[in-house]
Image (cartoon, rainbow, N blue to C red):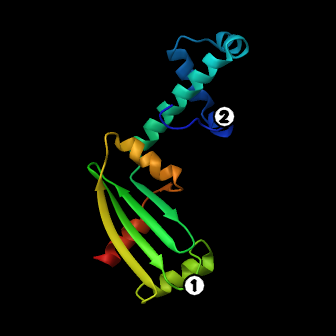
Amino acid sequence: MKYKRLTKEQLEELHPEFINFLATQSITADEWDTLKKEKPGVAEDEIDVFSDLIWEGVLNKVEYLENVSEKHMHLFHLTEKEMKLLSVKILNPEIDLRTEIGFGWFKRNYQSDFVEYLTASKAYGEDKNVDKFGLIKQGAVITKGELYQWFEQIVE
């Protein structure tokens, strides 16, 4: 597998797409049931291929990722050529960005000495979708980029 297998819940959500995928493989519903019983390894391989196709489609479209921890925010803008990072570090030991109170503090104090910013960019490796997926594996989530865009205006 190039990425990771979709969860059971994700597969259930994508059931119509999976049926279409099997149809493109010339696998009928009866053949799929037989395959699961008699050749579970082959059935697992089909699920893996489908999972990779779904991930590839999602990763091709993703433009923004966010990874927020107690003291850091890593906001990514995934452009055609590179990954841009806006990083925020909170130096106030009493603040946890993952809480509503902590994030509220940050919004009020984003210009204080208790907040550090860093910007960086990095070219993609051989496969930009693998690079994007690596960030997701490290805890980043796909977003619409509102926070990144807000920060971009602040930092400039």
Quarter where residue 118 is shown: bottom left
At 54% from the left and 56% from the top, the residue drawn is 139
Residue 141, image x, y percentages: 51, 55
At 55% from the left and 37% from the top, the residue drawn is 4
Residue 101, image x, y percentages: 61, 81
Q: Which residue is mark 1?
A: 93
Vertical relation: 147 (above or below) 79 = below
In which quadrant will I find the C terminus? bottom left
SS class, disc 1: loop
Q: Which residue is mark 2?
A: 12
Give the foreground label among 2 and 1: 1
- Disc 2 marks which amino acid? Glu
Mark 2 or mark 1: whose residue is earlier in sequence: 2
For disc 1, the neighbor class at 10 Å (few under 14, some 14 to 19, many from 20) is few
- Disc 1 marks which amino acid? Pro
Cα distance between the residues tagged 2 and 1 = 43 Å
